[in-house]
Amino acid sequence: MTTVGRRALLTAGAAGAATALAGCTSGGDEGPRKPTAAERAAAAEAALRARSATTSRELLLRYDAVVDGHPALAARLAPLRASVAAQVKALAEGGTAPAAGPDASASPSPTPSPTRSLAFVRVPADPAAALRDLAAAARATADTHTAALLTAPPEYARLLASVAASGAAHAYLLTEGGRG
């Protein structure tokens, strides 16, 4: 009878251990947890913020390249460049995109950092042509921000609309506004 009792005890212990081990690993059998609607919305907004900030950061880089290629335009471009630098910061706030750097709103022609390179931006030799190209880039950036309004949450959509309107004004000031 002792043999049967031992077997019963060993069987029960083995079954208990197996159950305990199964309980430890059964959480992985359910598959990955699906994100909630709020998590999906937050991820979509973070991605939109990153794209929008990058778009404006590229325009900021263009301003820097024009000033680098045509230093005589620095005073004229300084307020517009400062506006774009502020927009980059505002567009990235609350998201994961880094701002253009500590010098984003500083002088009209900051020293390029390793994360930014003026070498990849072509600037026409003629200052008027450089301003036209910069105006076209401002217009394209404004158009990109306007298109993003369709998927933006309400508060961020208001910011994008403001930035897009500012870009349209910049395009005007860079071309028509300079005549007179």
Image: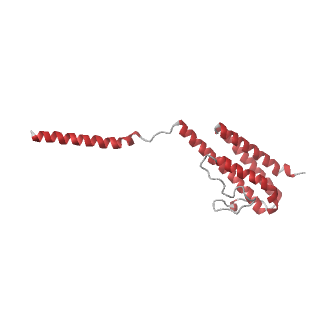
Closer-to-camera residue (140/27): 27
* Image position of 156 (left or right of 136): left
Position above or below: 88 against 149: below
Q: Is the image coloured rainbow, by chain, by secondary structure, or in one colour? A: secondary structure
Residue at (55%, 37%) from the top-left corner? 38
* Image position of 31 (left or right of 53): left
Q: If the image is split into quadrants, where does the N terminus sit? A: top left
Instruction: State the image quarter where residue 102 is shown.
Output: bottom right
- Residue 25 image point, x, y percent: 35, 43
Closer-to-camera residue (30/78): 78
Closer-to-camera residue (154/65): 154
* Image position of 95 (left or right of 130): left
- Residue 178 image point, x, y percent: 86, 52
* Image position of 110 (left or right of 42): right
Q: Which residue sits furthest right?
A: 180
Residue at (77%, 52%) from the top-left corner? 80
Q: How many marks on residues?
A: 0
- Residue 141 image point, x, y percent: 72, 48
